[in-house]
Image: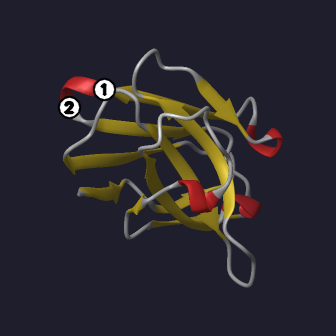
Amino acid sequence: QVQLVESGGGLVQAGGSLTLSCAASGRTFSSYAMGWFRQAPGKEREFVTAIRLSGGSTYYADSVKGRFTISRDNAKNTVYLQINNLKPEDTAVYYCAADPSGLPISSVAPRYDYWGQGTQVTVSS
């Protein structure tokens, strides 16, 4: 079992920056991919980005390229999501998720077996 706990959300003005953290506990392996998803009010959950713990390869949704950066600290079992130039449309609950399959990084939510409880990001205009 893997437990994921997100932190770092909050209320930010448009144009500001935020760094979200996802701390993993339990068994994780270098083959895991860790992803971030978000869900805005009234909308479906959408893929944001993911990273493979071994090697650090990354994958971003087109909508966030250039403003979002995912990184990991394997020693701390923590994955980070840095968000720059925040926009009101970034307002959502951000979820961390783990894909233990070892398959190529996926943007599909069902591929991720473990999920955190989410952290709220609110961007004011």
- Nearest the camera: 71 or 106? 106
Q: Quadrant of the N terminus?
A: bottom left
Please tell me in which quadrant of the rendered image residue 39 appears. Answer: bottom right
Q: Quadrant of the C terminus?
A: bottom right
According to the picture, the residue beneath numbered tag 1 turns out to be 73
- Horizontal relation, residue 31 to residue 61: left or right: left
Q: Residues within 10 Å of mark 1 (few under 14, many from 20)?
A: few
Please, what secondary structure does the residue beneath circle 2 have? helix
Please, what secondary structure does the residue beneath circle 1 have? strand
- Residue 51 pos. (x, y %): 52, 32
Instruction: State the colouring used for the structure image.
Output: secondary structure
- Rendered position, 1 above or below 31: below
Residue projecting furthest to the right: 62
Q: In the image, what residue type sits under mark 1?
A: Asp
Q: Are marks 1 and 2 in contact (CB under 8 Å)?
A: yes
Say which residue appears at 73% left-offset and 74% top-offset.
44
- Residue 49 pos. (x, y %): 62, 41
Say which residue appears at 48% left-offset and 34% top-offset.
102
According to the picture, the residue beneath numbered tag 2 turns out to be 76
Residue projecting furthest to the top: 55
Give the CA separation, mark 1 to mark 2. 5 Å
